[in-house]
Image: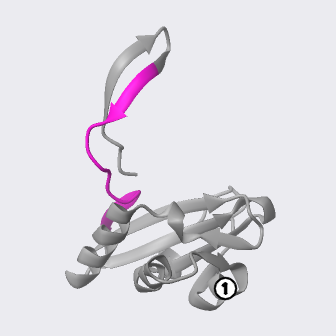
Amino acid sequence: KSPTPIQVLKNDEDFISKAYFKRVSSLDFSGVFKGKHIEIEAKSTQNPTIFNFNNIQTHQNERMKKLIELGCLVYLVIEFKSINRFFLMEGEHAISFFEGSPKNVPINLIEEQSKELFLKPNFTLDILENI
């Protein structure tokens, strides 16, 4: 998991009460898989039928494009929280949806362009076994 760089301005006892982002963050997860650099962004929606690609920030889309140009593996994990479904989408498809119109993409198109992931008994997703 990639940390989000923040500058703490004020602490109130055991929690941060005021802070700002030092710089734009990268994607959520990064590493090496089968000798290739890999980055994964994870997003969630409460909507059971639509994912809004505006949930991806412009700098994240630009990073995905650059990584793909460099030959890296790039993926988007989408959680439909209210129906407990998860999808693994290749970065190229995520970029197409982000840059396309409309931004609200129905789950049936997500199903067509992704691989569904299933929770393990210990409530984890094995993303790498699906790449």
Q: Residue at x 63, y 82 (%)?
A: 110
Q: Is residue 51 left or right of residue 130?
A: right
Report the residue at 33% width, 73% height from top.
64
Residue ID at (35%, 44%): 3
Residue 25 included in the magenta stretch of the image: yes
Task: Choose between 61 and 131: the one closer to the eye.
Answer: 61
Q: Does residue 126 show up? A: no
x, y percentage for residue 77?
54, 69
Q: Quadrant of residue 53?
A: bottom right
- 119 left or right, relative to 21: right
Magenta range = 17-32
The residue carrying mark 1 is 111
Instruction: Please check the rendered image and state whether residue 49 is part of the magenta-colored stretch, yes or no.
Output: no
Mark 1: amino acid: Glu
| 111 over 41 or under it: above or below | below
Residue lying furthest top: 13
Q: Report whether residue 113 is seen.
A: yes
Q: Is residue 86 above or below residue 69?
A: above
Question: At which x and y percent is residue 115?
Answer: 60, 84
Seen in the image, is 102 located left or right of residue 58? right
Q: Residue at x 33, y 23 (%)?
A: 8
Q: Secondary structure at mark 1?
A: helix
